[in-house]
Amino acid sequence: METKETTTESAQNVIITPELLREHWQGHRRLTRRTIEAFPDEHFYIFSIGGMRPFANLVMEIMALSGPGIQGVVYGDWTFPKYPLGFDTPVPATKTEILAVWDLITSEIDRLWPEIPASRFQETELGYGMYEGTIQYLLFYMIDNEIHHRGQGYVYLRSLGIEPPAFWDRN
């Protein structure tokens, strides 16, 4: 007979599987990629409202978290010596170049994800040298950060008279 504690622990372990979490993240990445594509080239690097950074800079922040972040999640190395994209990486000159880096990071997430043991998601680390939390918390931080900046991109697109991609369509 299961106790309440055992049942609770079992439920916590099956709320979302690692594979569902990866797919959830990749769904957001697909939507953000479509948002980048929808942004007019002539405004991508310069358009700003209310002192917010241009969308290209916001996208760079997303990539600077997710690219090195997946390496931190998998290997526990948050110093990023092996990854070319870090917080000080200059913004690529074209949207096409940014999308190429975006796609590289997307494929790295898919390639490295199977290496994460299930127990790793509950381990606590100091991500990026500043955010202490479990690996799942750090992954949620990366996803939440992306959603936040994509929302800023939506505001920019709407102010430019462009309908952004449907926020619910992550296919």
Image (tube, helix red, strand yellow):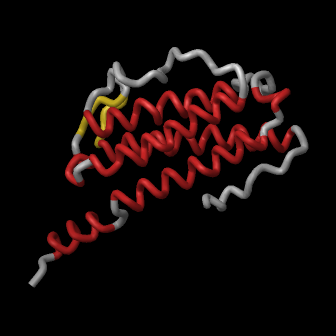
Give percent across and percent down for residue 154.
74, 44
Residue located 49% across and 20% down the image: 87
Residue located 68% across and 43% down the image: 151
* Quadrant of the drawing holding the N terminus: bottom left
Image quarter of residue 155: top right
Name of the residue lying farthest toward the right: 161
Give percent across and percent down for residue 166.
72, 58
Name of the residue lying farthest toward the left: 1
Image quarter of residue 84: top left
Would residue 124 be found to the left or right of residue 41 on screen?
Answer: left
Image quarter of residue 95: top right
* Quadrant of the drawing holding the C terminus: bottom right
Residue located 88% across and 38% down the image: 160
Vertical arrangement, residue 131 with respect to residue 103, above or below: above
Vertical arrangement, residue 41 with respect to residue 92, above or below: below
Vertical arrangement, residue 153 with respect to residue 10, above or below: above
Would residue 106 be found to the left or right of residue 81 on screen?
Answer: right
Give percent across and percent down for residue 150.
65, 42
Q: Report the number of numbered marks.
A: 0
Would residue 61 be found to the left or right of residue 153 on screen?
Answer: left
Give percent across and percent down for residue 73.
32, 38
Instruction: From the viewer's side, name the closer residue of 104 and 127.
Output: 104
Instruction: From the viewer's side, name the closer residue of 80 and 6.
Output: 80
Residue located 41% across and 24% down the image: 83
Name of the residue lying farthest toward the bottom: 1
